[in-house]
Amino acid sequence: MDQRIARFTHAGVADAEVSVHPFATEDGLGLNLTRFRRADCDDVVLLVHGLTTSSDMYIMPEHENLVNFLHDSGFGDVWALDFRMSGRFPYDAETHRFTLDDVAQYDHPAALAELRRHIGDRRVHVITHCLGSVSFAMAVFAGTVTGITSLTCNSVALTPRTSRWSRIKLGYGPAALEYVLGPSHLDPRYGTAPVLTRGWMIAKAVGPFHPGCDEPACHMLSFMWGGGKPIFTHAKMSPVTHGRLPDLFGSVGVHYYRHVHKMVKAGRAVKYDPRDPRHAALPADYLEGAADVTTPILFLTGDRNHVFTDSNIVCHRMLEAVTPGLHELEILPGYGHQDPFMGAASAAEVFPQVLDFLKRKAG
């Protein structure tokens, strides 16, 4: 379907005051918080995207989005973070060696400091997705972020698990791309790259293995993240969304895959390089202090999650054994990895479960 929505637009949230709040991390990156305020509220909600997406996944104009849903449900002060994995920034199209430890140590604490500067000591509820979920949970369990009233993690958190094919790609893909094929990142726009460029050839090679649709960006995203299958259930996505996937997902710096691979092998969130002095204060194993964490977590996962499979089911089970009754699990019938927050009917089928959790944890 032809694109009818401007890239990086805030048009999806019309009935609110929108303001952008830039801030910097200790390691020298400029990031953004965007505030969508319809009314003051004692319970503030912060939305955190995943790798390659951005705050745009929460403000899509083509259907009721999460920001508007929260506003309509009494949470009038909603913020969305764009951290270093955001498709709104150039960082992942550059050669870099960022890890999830960097995000947990630098991005999330700086974001919360900026947020607190504006909202004071009001309660903060955080809703996260994908590697935003992993990195924010890491920050909470490492203590670099404190004072979180509730946390919602979609698809994955502290026990990343993938299909066998994804494990192979995670293990060999980064080196093959950086040292053999050429690019240090993957981009869903490769399908429209100039003919015979490396990106165009990668997209052409990937296409035949994803016969479920005729959208090259969808094929690339399945290759970048899916275990040989789409990262969402097509029936759950609006055709408009499917047609503008290149605007909703940016480039992926492949070094993140190395850290995810190490976690998948370990069966839990672990530090990428224990010898790195910058991360000396972070735990080698982010679950080692799980018994001391009092923030309740809602684990969401689709039962057709082809990216992180049963990661959140396993994480909930593991934490239930340590802190019984603190955390909750919701399995979403028919949903995959990305569609719980971006699906056409998510406002009716997914958001109410999140809202129920927020209201029970709010003051």
Image: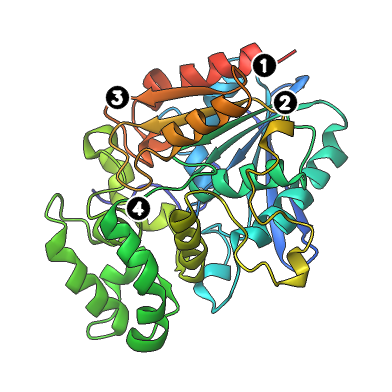
Q: Residue at x 30, y 53 (%)?
A: 226
Instruction: Please give the residue where the numbered disc 4 appears in the rendered image.
Output: 245
Q: Residues within 10 Å of mark 4 (few under 14, many from 20)?
A: some
Tell me where residue 72 appears, x and y as whole percent.
57, 17
Q: Amino acid at mark 3?
A: Pro
Instruction: Please give the residue where the numbered disc 3 appears in the rendered image.
Output: 333
Q: Give whichever of 139, 26 is nearer the camera.
A: 139
Instruction: Please give the residue where the numbered disc 2 appears in the rendered image.
Output: 149
330 horizontally vs 75: left or right: left
Tell me where residue 261 appears, x and y as whole percent.
45, 61
Distance (Cα) linking label 4 and label 1: 34 Å
Q: Give whichever of 260, 345 is nearer the camera.
A: 260
Mark 3 and mark 4 in contact (Cβ < 8 Å)? no
**Which quadrant does the C terminus fall into?**
top right
Distance (Cα) linking label 2 and label 3: 27 Å
Upstream in sequence: badge 1 or badge 2: 2
Mark 4 and mark 2 in contact (Cβ < 8 Å)? no
Asked if residue 120 is positioned above or below residue 101 in the image, the reply reads: above
Upstream in sequence: badge 3 or badge 1: 3
Secondary structure type for disc 2: loop
Secondary structure type for disc 1: helix
356 horizontally vs 291: left or right: left
Distance (Cα) linking label 2 and label 4: 33 Å
Distance (Cα) linking label 1 and label 2: 7 Å
Upstream in sequence: badge 4 or badge 3: 4
